[in-house]
Amino acid sequence: MDSRLLFQDAAGFATSLLAVFAVDIATGKDTEPLPALMTTSDAINDAAAKILGTGEFKAALGETLVLHSPAGLKAERLLIVGLGKAKTLSIDEIRKGAGTAVRFLKPRGLRDLAIALPQDHALSDEHLESLPCLGMTRALIEGAALAEIDYDTYKSDRKDTAVHSLTVVASDADKSSRAEIQAGFDEGLTVAAAQNFTRSLVNEPGNVLTPTVLGQRAAAMCAEVGLKCEVYSMDKLLELGMGAFAAVSQGSSEPPALIVMTYEPAGGSAPNAPVIGLVGKGITFDTGGISIKPADGMEKMKYDMAGAGAMIGAMRAIAQLKPAVKIVSVVCSAENMPDGKAFKPGDVITAMSGKTIEIINTDAEGRLVLADGLHYAKTLGCTHLIDAATLTGACVVALGILNVGLFSNDDASVEAFQSGLATSGEKFWRLPCTDEYRDQIKSQIADIMNTGKNRWGGAITAAMFLKEFVGDTPWIHLDIAGCAWNDESKPWIANGPSGIAVRSIVEWVRTFGK
């Protein structure tokens, strides 16, 4: 989708379809919705006034209403997109509104779209608090770019529903904010492209995206954006003593891939500057190994590398946004298969750190590869760590599909991470990771077990396992199992891989660059 930013009166822009956002400014609990457009254009407001006065359109989030041949406009159609209540409006609703406009367009054979950049000052302070121009513009372009993709990659009869061009039209009256709007537009293109890159990786079937191919695609991305990338296989795992990672890999005929991507800020890092480590679980297909999963739903286990995909996508955005901090990403990729050489329940393996692990369940393999990945990141000089993984079904039971589970050993890291969520629009919920839970993973014959003694608090015991390998290093763990795949389409995005956590990881990294 070719995207551009234009400063002019949106009413005078000729296009197949012009989208404008509306919010419900009614403040009383029992009052009828009162939709109002987020534009100061008199022509657009006049064109929509009659239909908005009928009460047919409520301005609910994702609600749409199209007017053909709107009077006073050069656009052939005017699409009004609801963002919900004005009092609770955030930039994430703008992201979803832009996505809704694109998704409305795609099945109707229209290929060109313009969106009027919302103007919060079109409404009084009583109705809406001021929103940052940069954030609104960035969210708009992100939402549009994310919505454009449909994951029907392997259909032989794919229909072309692509949106060819998007024009974001900012009012001439916003000239004072022009630099901020342009910066938001550029950032939005960068971050959305990174998230879509992640989504494309997660969508691939396991017979296409093997660990080797994941390494190749990561290396190609790094070459494109100027990152250093090294990809190793089993020999390197054995040389480093990565017994946990190697154990997971040994049951598959596909070799593992240890992917290390490095970003260096221009001019190098200052003395004693932090080094940020991004660690991703990259299980390109997970059968559960000897502790094999039920057949129902196993096909979805191609998405078990979504944590790795998030880190690879984040590194793509980081290379282009250029924060002033060094970042090293370690991706541990393997297949978990039930071959005759596969590791077994009851085995004891030794991780790179020297800790011994009693294997209780071979389907708890993600934490094993992450254990070696986290420790390795520390040996590469990382002073702050974050990992992402589709780690536990228990986290989905606890939080459903709306929030990612967040665990940490460091309150300051969590505070910095959460400071970026207003920008990223993603939802995370912190769960405990305190020492009283450690008894659940104590082993009689080894240092620790790879699962808890019982099923209770499974997401927490998984986090406690990872905590064993970070020591005192500030660390955040993101259990993205419930949010990495959208089972159902929404008005603003197709079903399929979500690319969750890319935006939030990028924002967290940027807090160090400030």
Image (cartoon, rainbow, N blue to C red):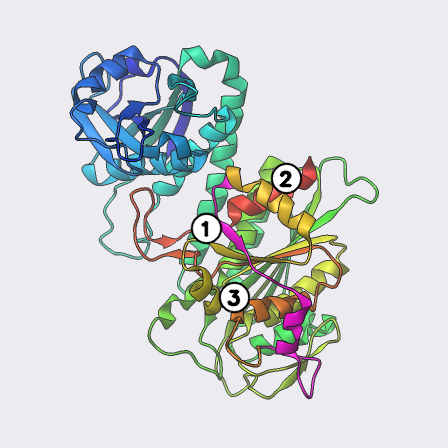
Asked if residue 256 shows in the view, the reply is: no
The part of the image, by quadrant, that contains residue 354 is bottom right
- Residue 391 marker: 3
Work out whether residue 253 or residue 459 is closer to the camera in this orientation and state it.
459
Taking the magenta stretch, the answer to whether it contains residue 437 is: yes
Q: Which residues are magenta?
A: 423-451
Work out whether residue 361 or residue 58 is closer to the camera in this orientation and state it.
58
The residue that disc 2 covers is 510
Q: Are marks 1 and 2 in contact (CB under 8 Å)?
A: no
Q: Which badge, 3 or 1, comes first in the chain's sequence? A: 3
Q: Are marks 3 and 2 in contact (CB under 8 Å)?
A: no
Q: Nearer the viewer, mark 3 or mark 1?
A: 3
Dot 2: element: helix
Question: Label 2 crowding class (10 Å Cα cut-off): few <14, some 14-19, many 20+?
Answer: some
Residue type at mark 2? Answer: Arg
Question: Label 1 crowding class (10 Å Cα cut-off): few <14, some 14-19, many 20+?
Answer: many
Taking the magenta stretch, the answer to whether it contains residue 215 is: no
Q: Residue at x 66, y 80 (%)?
A: 442
Dot 1: element: loop
The residue that disc 1 covers is 499
